[in-house]
Image (cartoon, rainbow, N blue to C red):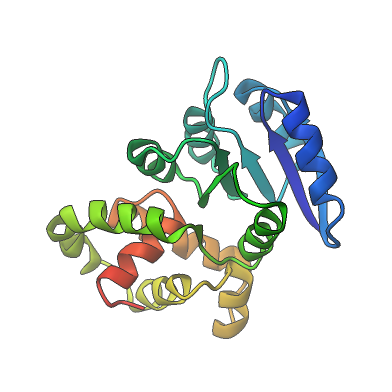
Amino acid sequence: MTRILLVDDHPMMRRGMRQLIEMQEGLQVVAEAGSGEEALALVPVHNPDMILMDLNMKGMDGIQTTAALRESGETACILIVTVSDNDSDVIAALRAGADGYLLKDLEPEELVSALLQAERGQLVLSPELTRILASTLRDEKADRTDHAAKLTDRERQILGMIAVGNSNKLIGAALGITEATVKVHVKNLLKKLNLRSRVEAAVWAVSNNLN
Protein backbone atom coordinates (compact mmCIF):
# COMPACT_ATOMS: atom_id res chain seq x y z
CA MET A 1 0.00 0.00 0.00
CA THR A 2 1.43 3.38 -1.06
CA ARG A 3 0.73 5.96 1.66
CA ILE A 4 -0.02 9.45 0.29
CA LEU A 5 -0.06 12.91 1.86
CA LEU A 6 -2.12 15.56 0.04
CA VAL A 7 -0.88 19.16 0.35
CA ASP A 8 -3.19 21.81 -1.12
CA ASP A 9 -4.79 24.93 0.34
CA HIS A 10 -8.10 24.26 -1.44
CA PRO A 11 -10.28 21.77 0.51
CA MET A 12 -12.37 20.92 -2.55
CA MET A 13 -9.26 20.00 -4.51
CA ARG A 14 -8.04 17.77 -1.68
CA ARG A 15 -11.43 16.09 -1.44
CA GLY A 16 -11.54 15.38 -5.17
CA MET A 17 -7.99 14.04 -5.16
CA ARG A 18 -8.71 11.82 -2.16
CA GLN A 19 -11.81 10.34 -3.77
CA LEU A 20 -9.95 9.66 -7.02
CA ILE A 21 -6.92 8.13 -5.31
CA GLU A 22 -8.86 5.89 -2.95
CA MET A 23 -10.72 4.32 -5.88
CA GLN A 24 -7.35 2.88 -6.93
CA GLU A 25 -6.23 -0.33 -5.26
CA GLY A 26 -2.83 0.02 -3.62
CA LEU A 27 -3.05 3.78 -2.99
CA GLN A 28 -4.13 5.27 0.35
CA VAL A 29 -4.40 8.90 1.49
CA VAL A 30 -3.12 8.92 5.07
CA ALA A 31 -3.31 12.68 5.74
CA GLU A 32 -4.11 16.09 4.26
CA ALA A 33 -2.37 19.42 4.78
CA GLY A 34 -3.77 22.83 3.90
CA SER A 35 -0.40 24.58 3.94
CA GLY A 36 3.31 23.98 3.59
CA GLU A 37 3.82 24.55 7.29
CA GLU A 38 1.20 21.93 8.13
CA ALA A 39 2.82 19.48 5.72
CA LEU A 40 6.18 19.83 7.47
CA ALA A 41 4.48 18.92 10.75
CA LEU A 42 2.52 15.97 9.33
CA VAL A 43 5.27 14.23 7.35
CA PRO A 44 7.23 12.88 10.36
CA VAL A 45 3.96 11.79 12.00
CA HIS A 46 2.52 9.85 9.05
CA ASN A 47 5.72 8.91 7.17
CA PRO A 48 4.11 8.94 3.69
CA ASP A 49 5.61 7.19 0.68
CA MET A 50 4.37 9.90 -1.67
CA ILE A 51 3.50 13.58 -1.27
CA LEU A 52 1.26 15.40 -3.76
CA MET A 53 2.16 19.06 -3.43
CA ASP A 54 0.31 22.12 -4.73
CA LEU A 55 2.63 24.82 -6.08
CA ASN A 56 0.88 28.09 -5.15
CA MET A 57 -0.16 28.22 -1.49
CA LYS A 58 -0.35 30.98 1.10
CA GLY A 59 2.66 31.09 3.38
CA MET A 60 5.20 28.50 2.27
CA ASP A 61 4.60 27.59 -1.37
CA GLY A 62 5.15 24.13 -2.83
CA ILE A 63 8.73 24.83 -3.89
CA GLN A 64 9.74 26.16 -0.46
CA THR A 65 8.02 23.23 1.26
CA THR A 66 9.69 20.69 -1.03
CA ALA A 67 13.09 22.26 -0.42
CA ALA A 68 12.52 22.23 3.35
CA LEU A 69 11.53 18.56 3.28
CA ARG A 70 14.62 17.61 1.28
CA GLU A 71 16.85 19.65 3.57
CA SER A 72 15.43 17.69 6.51
CA GLY A 73 16.40 14.43 4.81
CA GLU A 74 12.92 13.42 3.66
CA THR A 75 13.12 10.75 0.91
CA ALA A 76 9.41 10.32 0.06
CA CYS A 77 8.44 10.76 -3.59
CA ILE A 78 7.27 14.38 -3.99
CA LEU A 79 5.08 15.26 -6.96
CA ILE A 80 4.11 18.85 -7.71
CA VAL A 81 0.48 19.07 -8.89
CA THR A 82 -0.31 22.53 -10.25
CA VAL A 83 -1.96 24.67 -12.92
CA SER A 84 1.35 26.34 -13.83
CA ASP A 85 3.32 25.17 -16.86
CA ASN A 86 5.74 28.10 -16.55
CA ASP A 87 9.30 27.02 -17.44
CA SER A 88 10.81 28.69 -14.38
CA ASP A 89 8.32 26.98 -12.05
CA VAL A 90 9.15 23.56 -13.52
CA ILE A 91 12.89 24.09 -13.12
CA ALA A 92 12.57 25.58 -9.63
CA ALA A 93 10.39 22.70 -8.42
CA LEU A 94 12.75 20.03 -9.69
CA ARG A 95 15.75 21.93 -8.36
CA ALA A 96 14.06 22.00 -4.96
CA GLY A 97 13.93 18.21 -5.04
CA ALA A 98 10.55 17.31 -6.56
CA ASP A 99 10.40 13.90 -8.26
CA GLY A 100 7.79 14.92 -10.78
CA TYR A 101 5.59 17.74 -12.03
CA LEU A 102 1.94 17.22 -13.03
CA LEU A 103 -0.61 19.68 -14.38
CA LYS A 104 -4.06 19.82 -12.80
CA ASP A 105 -5.78 19.69 -16.20
CA LEU A 106 -4.86 16.01 -16.51
CA GLU A 107 -7.73 13.61 -17.07
CA PRO A 108 -8.45 11.56 -13.91
CA GLU A 109 -7.17 8.34 -15.49
CA GLU A 110 -3.99 10.13 -16.58
CA LEU A 111 -3.36 11.31 -13.03
CA VAL A 112 -3.85 7.81 -11.62
CA SER A 113 -1.51 6.42 -14.28
CA ALA A 114 1.11 9.01 -13.34
CA LEU A 115 0.84 8.11 -9.65
CA LEU A 116 1.31 4.43 -10.44
CA GLN A 117 4.35 5.31 -12.56
CA ALA A 118 5.81 7.29 -9.68
CA GLU A 119 5.11 4.40 -7.32
CA ARG A 120 7.30 2.21 -9.56
CA GLY A 121 10.07 4.81 -9.53
CA GLN A 122 9.51 5.99 -13.10
CA LEU A 123 9.74 9.58 -14.30
CA VAL A 124 6.55 11.60 -13.96
CA LEU A 125 7.03 14.51 -16.32
CA SER A 126 5.26 15.33 -19.56
CA PRO A 127 7.42 15.25 -22.74
CA GLU A 128 7.33 19.04 -23.18
CA LEU A 129 8.49 19.59 -19.60
CA THR A 130 11.26 17.01 -20.04
CA ARG A 131 12.55 19.04 -22.98
CA ILE A 132 12.61 22.18 -20.82
CA LEU A 133 14.68 20.43 -18.17
CA ALA A 134 17.00 18.75 -20.66
CA SER A 135 17.70 22.11 -22.31
CA THR A 136 18.57 23.72 -18.97
CA LEU A 137 20.87 20.86 -17.99
CA ARG A 138 22.63 20.97 -21.36
CA ASP A 139 23.48 24.62 -20.73
CA GLU A 140 25.32 23.51 -17.57
CA LYS A 141 26.86 20.39 -19.11
CA ALA A 142 30.55 21.23 -18.88
CA ASP A 143 30.64 21.83 -15.14
CA ARG A 144 28.52 18.79 -14.36
CA THR A 145 30.54 16.52 -16.67
CA ASP A 146 33.61 17.34 -14.58
CA HIS A 147 31.69 16.32 -11.47
CA ALA A 148 30.61 13.05 -13.13
CA ALA A 149 34.23 11.94 -13.20
CA LYS A 150 34.06 11.77 -9.39
CA LEU A 151 31.30 9.14 -9.42
CA THR A 152 32.26 5.68 -8.25
CA ASP A 153 31.52 2.70 -10.52
CA ARG A 154 28.59 1.77 -8.26
CA GLU A 155 27.17 5.31 -8.35
CA ARG A 156 27.46 5.39 -12.14
CA GLN A 157 25.72 2.01 -12.31
CA ILE A 158 22.88 3.21 -10.11
CA LEU A 159 22.57 6.46 -12.07
CA GLY A 160 22.07 4.43 -15.24
CA MET A 161 19.36 2.37 -13.55
CA ILE A 162 17.59 5.51 -12.33
CA ALA A 163 17.64 6.83 -15.90
CA VAL A 164 15.59 3.88 -17.15
CA GLY A 165 13.02 4.26 -14.39
CA ASN A 166 14.05 1.79 -11.70
CA SER A 167 12.97 2.47 -8.12
CA ASN A 168 15.40 2.15 -5.20
CA LYS A 169 13.77 -1.17 -4.30
CA LEU A 170 14.29 -2.60 -7.79
CA ILE A 171 17.86 -1.30 -7.95
CA GLY A 172 18.66 -2.90 -4.60
CA ALA A 173 17.20 -6.24 -5.69
CA ALA A 174 19.12 -6.19 -8.97
CA LEU A 175 22.45 -5.31 -7.32
CA GLY A 176 22.01 -7.46 -4.22
CA ILE A 177 22.15 -4.53 -1.79
CA THR A 178 19.59 -3.06 0.61
CA GLU A 179 17.21 -0.26 -0.34
CA ALA A 180 18.79 1.85 2.41
CA THR A 181 22.21 1.41 0.79
CA VAL A 182 20.78 2.46 -2.58
CA LYS A 183 19.39 5.62 -0.96
CA VAL A 184 22.85 6.48 0.35
CA HIS A 185 24.38 6.02 -3.10
CA VAL A 186 21.64 8.15 -4.70
CA LYS A 187 22.15 10.91 -2.14
CA ASN A 188 25.91 10.87 -2.80
CA LEU A 189 25.65 10.94 -6.59
CA LEU A 190 23.12 13.79 -6.52
CA LYS A 191 25.49 15.77 -4.32
CA LYS A 192 28.47 15.11 -6.61
CA LEU A 193 26.49 16.15 -9.69
CA ASN A 194 24.98 19.17 -7.91
CA LEU A 195 21.47 17.89 -8.63
CA ARG A 196 18.47 17.91 -6.30
CA SER A 197 16.16 15.20 -7.61
CA ARG A 198 16.03 11.79 -9.29
CA VAL A 199 14.24 13.41 -12.21
CA GLU A 200 17.12 15.80 -12.82
CA ALA A 201 19.58 12.92 -12.49
CA ALA A 202 17.66 10.74 -14.94
CA VAL A 203 17.26 13.48 -17.56
CA TRP A 204 20.93 14.45 -17.22
CA ALA A 205 22.05 10.81 -17.53
CA VAL A 206 19.99 10.28 -20.69
CA SER A 207 21.24 13.57 -22.18
CA ASN A 208 24.81 12.42 -21.59
CA ASN A 209 24.33 8.81 -22.72
CA LEU A 210 24.98 7.40 -19.25
CA ASN A 211 21.89 5.19 -19.24
180 relative position to 27: left or right: left
Residue drawn at (73%, 46%) of the image: 48
Left or right of residue 159, residue 167 in this image = right
Name the spot of residue 145 as percent of width and height, x first: 18, 64
Q: How many marks?
A: 0
Foreground: 47 or 63?
A: 63
Along the line of sight, the residue nearer the viewer: 140 or 57: 57
| Quadrant occupied by the N terminus | bottom right
Q: Is 111 situated above or below 63? A: below
Seen from the viewer's position, the closer of residues 69 and 179 is 69
Is residue 1 or residue 79 the one in the foreground? 79
Q: Is residue 154 visible?
A: yes
* Image x and y of residue 191, in percent: 35, 52
Residue visible at 33% across and 72% down in the picture = 206
Q: Residue at x 65, y 58 (%)?
A: 110
Is residue 76 left or right of 42 when viewed as pictured?
left
| Side of 140 relative to 165 (left or right) | left
Q: Quadrant of residue 176?
A: bottom right
Residue 140 seen in the current view? no
Residue 209: give x, y in percent of width and height: 27, 77
Q: Quadrant of the C terminus?
A: bottom left
At which x and y percent is residue 174?
58, 84
Q: Is 71 drawn above or below residue 27 in the view shown?
A: above
Residue 12 to residue 24: above or below: above
Q: Residue at x 63, y 59 (%)?
A: 114
Residue that lies at the very extreme toward the left in this rendered image: 142
